[in-house]
Image (spheres, grey):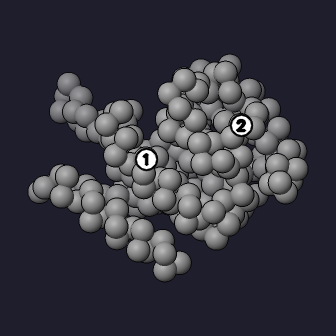
Amino acid sequence: MGDMKAFERECEAFFRPLWPGEDKILVFGDGNSDHPPIMLIGEAPGEQETLKRRPFVGKAGKNLDEFLDLMGMERETLYVSNVVKIRPTSLGKTGRVRNRAPSKEEIALFLPFLMKEIDLVKPQSIVTLGNVPLKALMGPKATVGELHGRWHTASNGLPLFALYHPAAIIYRRELKEVYAQDVLALKSSLTIETSK
Ligand code: URA
């Protein structure tokens, strides 16, 4: 889509000068960018995403496959993106590069671009994975613990369904069943919500 390419160039032009000399890779959204039934929004890309320049591949891609299986959907049906488009990293004690959660400043810098991306893609609904996209679209008081598994209205007026971040399920096994139930609730309500 022409507009998406222009959007990506605009992002590059804004962010590139912020990290002079660093080869930071921006990982843009991918999939159906023409009014998809769902725009799935994660936190930020990790190592594999940065290498492949595609959101939710590698370990996170497995989680996405599970989601798609439960939904009975193909990845190409959806548009998949992240709030923050660079991989937030820190150096571990042994000097290894590690993922970290995106900072408030990074989220604030990327938020206007996310809003623009949503305007371009015009999804029928938004599904957030974890607190980062949920707070970005519903304000700082929103928490996934309280809001998961139900529809809400995002700051831009779109229907928003909150899910736990798939990584949370790895650390908290008790969430696995909750997550699966939430996805099934999303599936059974989707036709109703998106026909609004
Ligand atoms: N990969 C992504 O692209 N986003 C996430 O939030 C997690 C893994």
Residue 135 versus residue 53: which sits nearer the camera? 135
The spot of residue 49 in percent (x, y) is 43, 54
> At label 2, which amino acid type do we have?
His
Going by the numbered disc 1, the residue's amino acid type is Leu
Between 165 and 34, which is closer to the camera in this rendering? 34
Where does residue 59 sit, x and y in percent of width and height? 51, 44
In this orientation, does residue 56 appear?
A: yes
Residue on which the image places disc 1: 111
**Callout 2 crowding tier (Cα within 10 Å): few <14, some 14–19, many ≥20:** some
Q: Residue at x 76, y 33 (%)?
A: 150
- Is residue 71 shown above or below 3? above
Name which of mark 2 and mark 1 comes first in the sequence: 1
Could you tell whether 129 is left or right of 28 in the image? Answer: right
Whether the residue carrying mark 1 lies under 8 Å from ligand 1 is answered with no
Q: Is residue 124 left or right of residue 21?
A: right
Residue at point 71%, 37% (across, down): 152
Q: Is mark 2 within 8 Å of ligand 1?
A: no
User: Is 128 rendered above or below residue 10?
Assistant: above
Say if mark 2 contacts mark 1, CB within 8 Å. Answer: no
| Left or right position of 55 against 104 | right
Which quarter of the figure has residue 100? top left
Q: In the rendered image of this protein, does residue 76 appear above or below residue 46?
A: below
Tell me the quarter of the picture where residue 72 sits: bottom right
Instruction: Identify the element where label 2 is drawn.
Output: strand
The residue to which callout 2 is attached is 152
Query: What's the distance in space between the residues labelled 2 and 1, CA to CA?
Result: 19 Å
The picture places residue 67, in percent across and down from the top left corner, at 70, 46
Which residue is at 11% across, 57% downward? 21
Q: Secondary structure at mark 1?
A: helix
| Quarter the C terminus occupies | bottom right
Q: Position of residue 53 (x, y in %)?
A: 41, 61
Identify the mark at residue 186; answer none if there is no mark. none
